Amino acid sequence: MSLFKRIFRSEFVQGSIGSILAAYVRLVGRTTRFTSEPADPWVAIAPLQPVITAMWHGEHVLVPLARRPSDRAASLVSRSADGEFAARMLAALGIRVIRGSGARGRKTAEKGGVAALRAMLRALADGEMVVLTADVPKVSRRCGPGIVLLAKLSGRPIVPIAVEGRNRIALKNWDATKIPLPFGRGAMIYGTPITVPADAGPEEMEAARLRVEAGLNAVHARAAELLGH
């Protein structure tokens, strides 16, 4: 490993970058005029807690702002080097981090998927809401089976969510990560909760997967409509 990489991945640098990212998210949250739909989403969601909050890769930066400060939350973050910065940022925002990710074209266990699933089930059983991307790495905006399996095993509903800013920069990576800019308008859209029966078979699981995918596309379409994207 080169000297640059060793420095970049050092505890001090990763912690510092995570703190800076968290401070930036707070800045955007404080300076953005958000429109929320529903206007008071927690009237319906609070009785369902703990819920599974679903988001798309690339649209995740502002999602931590959608929870209430009193809500305990855990978020699934990949074990990649890039994921380390996201993990540090979330920890600085008061969100517990679970490391692991779904696999594509390989055994899930190779990327910590089985352990992560168990950790998320424990979090939900302990009353923590769980936040995770519904699409698997490198396949943007196509819901994978993992989030549906988590809902089936836990008995907790999935809530699709979109949190976007009108002014933003799109990175040139596989999921076109959107970096929102401060001092603008934003939209916070909460979708209809989706439940998965404990005895759901393959057909019901696929139907639930498609409902999550459609739900996420719908909340992002509404956010885009409100913000003029």
Image (cartoon, helix red, strand yellow):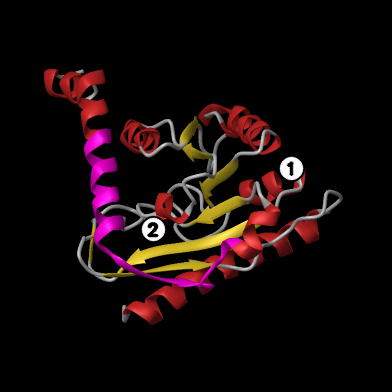
Q: Secondary structure at mark 1?
A: helix
**Magenta segment main secondary structure:** helix
Identified at 26% across, 19% down, the residue is 11
Q: Say whether residue 178 is visible.
A: no
Q: CA distance from mark 2 to mark 1?
A: 25 Å
The image shows residue 159, relative to residue 121, as above or below, that is: below
Picture coordinates of residue 96, whole percent (x, y): 48, 33
Q: Say whether residue 7 is visible.
A: yes
Q: Which mark is residue 218?
A: none
Crowdedness near tag 2: few (<14), some (14–19) or many (≥20) residues, C-alpha within 10 Å: many
The image shows residue 136, relative to residue 184, as above or below, that is: above
Picture coordinates of residue 104, whole percent (x, y): 53, 43
The part of the image, by quadrant, that contains residue 83 is top left
Of residues 74 and 202, the one nearer the viewer is: 74
Of residues 184 and 149, the one nearer the viewer is: 184
Q: Is residue 212 left or right of residue 216?
A: right
The image shows residue 47, relative to residue 218, as above or below, that is: above
Mark 1 lies on residue: 154
| Quarter of the image with the C terminus in it | bottom left
Q: Which mark is residue 59?
A: 2
Mark nearer the N terminus (2 vs 1): 2
Kindly identify the amino acid type of the residue bearing the numbered disc 2. Answer: Glu
| Quarter of the image with the N terminus in it | top left
Q: Which residues are magenta?
A: 18-42
Identified at 20% across, 65% down, the residue is 183
The image shows residue 207, relative to residue 177, as above or below, that is: below
Identified at 45% across, 64% down, the residue is 162
Picture coordinates of residue 225, whole percent (x, y): 39, 81
Q: Is residue 213 left or right of residue 19?
A: right
